[in-house]
Image (tube, rainbow, N blue to C red):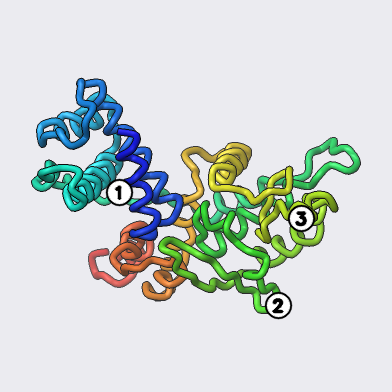
Amino acid sequence: MGDVLRAFLAYLRVECGLRPASVEAYQRDTRDLFSDLSGSGITDPASVQPQDLIRHIQHLSREREHAPATVARHIATIKVLSRWMYATGRAETDPATHLDQPARWKRLPDVLSRAQMRALVEAPAPPPKAKPGTVPLWVRDRSILELMYASGLRASEVGAIAMGGVNLDARELRVEGKGGRVRVVPLGVPAADALDTYLRECRPVLITAERALERRDKGRVFLTRTGRPIDRVRVWQLVKKHAKTAGLINVHPHTLRHSFATHLLAGGADLRVVQDLLGHADLSTTQIYTHVDRTDLRNTVKRCHPRG
């Protein structure tokens, strides 16, 4: 199964041109499938039958209690894998041909209020007893939180921001999103100021002369304590950390993105403008935010309807 997995991942990277994060997701799902099959005594992927796939999906849903969206992603991976094996002659049939995607309810995203967002972005602060020479990482963290809320950035996009993509004079940021799509997003004054402070006071400290020679930073804006580009896992960690400090629960990086979109629409922004800012390829993906904030609708009915 290892040879099949390696060939499948190479196909995804080279022929499909998928980005590393997508390939990693396919890899995890395929490994889960192969592990489950091995546990059932199936060691040859070419011998897999439809009932084996159904049993695996039921295992994910019932025993591992994966969310419907996660199960749907696993099914998508299985269908791609099965089609590839059949097309390349590694299997005589495609056992996933009649495997259907489950119907899924659209879950409304969690959104913070304006006051909660303010508490979150202001949570990073200098420690009360900071030692001289301490790296001001709180400056970096505040800049990241400000940018994520100001521009609707994904966690992965934060780490990918290049120094050449920052234009503080125009208050703009060049962001590379999913599928390699590039968009330019404007920065509000607080976000631009926070970024400027980080670039002046924190980033130079993270790049010592030795690290500069090694080019550890790879030209990225946000760096770790060791001068390397920050990754999405670290972004998740710092968001959770500062949310806890602000007294907020169930907050993750996408919460800031959801709040960005919802607050824009509640303030009267056009849906297609928000689509462009978020980097959504399909408008239907953005439309979910029109169902989140119902306050204006209730107020309008109450103000305008004779029986409101």
Q: Secondary structure at mark 3?
A: helix
Residue type beneath disc 1? Arg
Q: How far from the left and from the top, in percent, is residue 154?
A: 49, 56
Give me the C-alpha separation between circle 1 and circle 3. 38 Å
Q: Check the picture and name the quadrant holding the N terminus.
A: top left
Q: Which residue is mark 3?
A: 203
Q: Which of the 4 image quarters holds residue 203?
A: bottom right
Of the two numbered discs 3 and 2 in the rendering, the one whose residue sits closer to the viewer:
3
Give left or right: position of 157 versus 292: right
Q: Which of the 4 image quarters holds residue 56?
A: top left
Q: Earlier in the sequence, mark 1 or mark 3?
A: 1
Residue at (34%, 59%) from the top-left corner?
15
Disc tally is 3
The residue lying toward the viewer, choosing from 205 and 288, is: 205
Q: Earlier in the sequence, mark 3 or mark 2?
A: 2
Q: Where 85 falls versus 217 (above or below)?
A: above
Give me the C-alpha separation between circle 3 and circle 2. 19 Å
Which label is found at residue 169? 2
Of the two numbered discs 1 and 3 in the rendering, the one whose residue sits closer to the viewer:
3
Residue type beneath disc 2? Asp
Q: Which residue is mark 1?
A: 107
The residue lying toward the viewer, choosing from 135 and 206, is: 206
Residue at (59%, 43%) from the top-left corner?
234
Q: Earlier in the sequence, mark 2 or mark 1?
A: 1
